[in-house]
Amino acid sequence: MSLPQSQTSGRFSWHWMAVALLLGVGALVRFHDIGGPSLWMDEIWSIEIASGRDHAHDQLPTGILMTEQRDLTSLAGSPPWWRVWSARSDYTYPPLYPLLLRWWMDLFGNGAAAVRSLSAVFCVAAIAAFFDVCRLLHGARLALLGAAMMTLAVAQIDIAQEARCYAMMLFLALACAGAMVRIEARGATKRRLLALAGFLAAMLLTHYLSIGLAVALLVYALIRLRGLDRRGVILALAGGAALALAVWAPSLYWQVRHLPGGTPLFLREADPARHASRTLRRVLGLPGEFLCGEAAAERMFRGQTPGDQILTVFLLLIAVLTLLVPFLRLRRRHDLWLWCLWILGNVGLLTLADAARGTTMAGYLRYTILASPAVYALIATFDWPRRPVLRHALGLAVLAAVALVSADRLAHPAPAKEDWRAAAADLQASAGSDEPIVFFNADPWVAPGMWYMCLHYYWPRCENPWLLLRRPPEGKLLEQLQSRSSMWLVGVDAQTAGPIVFPGWQVQRVFRPTEAVCICRMIRIAQP
């Protein structure tokens, strides 16, 4: 395969000015109203881990009515930063992102805009890294088209405004790819091999789902490289993986041994009999989700209005052109190998895991976002041979559609995933100072202390008694609660479960900050 002209020239050219413009636009749309929506549970959890307290919410006492408040997210009185690296928990997460977030919080604080801005910076940097990879593979013009899609894609804006590790993982994955294709284009040098090993180790220390992409890069090296270049890349990949394993292995071993049994509730298939068809739908909806956000994917198969039907046809066409057609063109388009393997390394791995375990990981943007650059690149590079006028028609049409959706997204921001800010404000205004706040959840994957932490983040001066429960109260604790006339219950379905968990009590009012959690005020009506 002949390399694009931009690949062989190191001189400054017009496309770098265009990239600078894209980076400016990318920063503008990613930082727009970044602190507006309430932080959701996983983001507040990130702050807790970065504060050096590990999973302190899991260690809060259960079954005891408490009056002393526990601050789990403040930097005041938090352990030193090196405790972030050595912390252990009951969940498998690598230590690199929490460590960087801690340093970031030391500089800018732990407010919503501050903690989310780290992800926004990584997402802007990912645009530049993606352009560099595409420029080396396909030339500057197609690289700009793909980078423009990535700049405006709603999914990229969404992931940039979450205080989670996925934006960082995306940037590091593209940095790995940049080192790989630069070796393919210009040969292996010590500096390039060290860069590849370093970026790979950092990627693996950011999220375990990047393992699939590491395997994809290894397969790419075996297919596309020869001789000393291939040998050097294999050694670099092995060295980066070994470094990541050596750093994370002690904590990982402890984490795996202490994982709760079963499958988390949010990953369970609602209708197991239709799991195969639902998984196929999720996979087919991914390209549209990467371009237009989760809302577009949810409408894809609804078909309730003519607009939904048109959207379904359009997004199915995009799915076929990105998930099927490129694999049929590999014999003639060797520059597509990286992106085809990239999709297999992420979407393929998740699909196999979902099929084997009956889970729904492919339905969550945060788990699949790593595959999004491949979709942008495959759309940008799709052409009609012998039709020069239509050569880039698909990419330009998709870019125009994405720009319209992105403009609408900025004009009408998406609601918060979980509105803990509103929940805390409602409780602060409505709860009497002597009314206990009870957090009840029997699911081993989500401790009731997590919900306590989320409310306390937005209501740090709360003085109400509080109680964590994993099973209905008994004995002396039940007597303590029965001595009170009212309380507040926070639970998965507190409205239904409340009278069952607390016989003789009834729900008086309901507030639902999330789809999965509701808050109820309960009053005692009789002795059980």
Image (tube, helix red, strand yellow):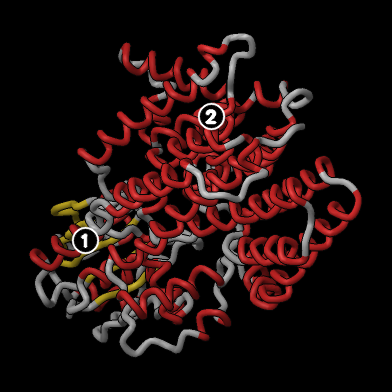
* In front: label 2 or label 1: 2
Residue with the mark numbered 2: 380
> What x and y, as percent, mark residue 187?
78, 52
Q: Amino acid at mark 1?
A: Arg
Q: Secondary structure at mark 2?
A: helix
Vertical comparison of 325 with 504: above or below: above
Residue under the image location 22 percent in, 76 percent down: 460
Say left or right for 185 vs 225: left
Camera-side residue: 485 or 246? 246
Quarter residue 66 falls in: bottom left
Residue under the image location 51 percent in, 80 percent down: 84
Which residue is at the far front? 11
> What x and y, as percent, mark residue 55?
47, 75
Say left or right for 179 vs 152: right
> What x and y, as percent, mark residue 37?
25, 54
Check residue 421 in the rendering and tell me which mark sits there, or answer none.
Answer: 1
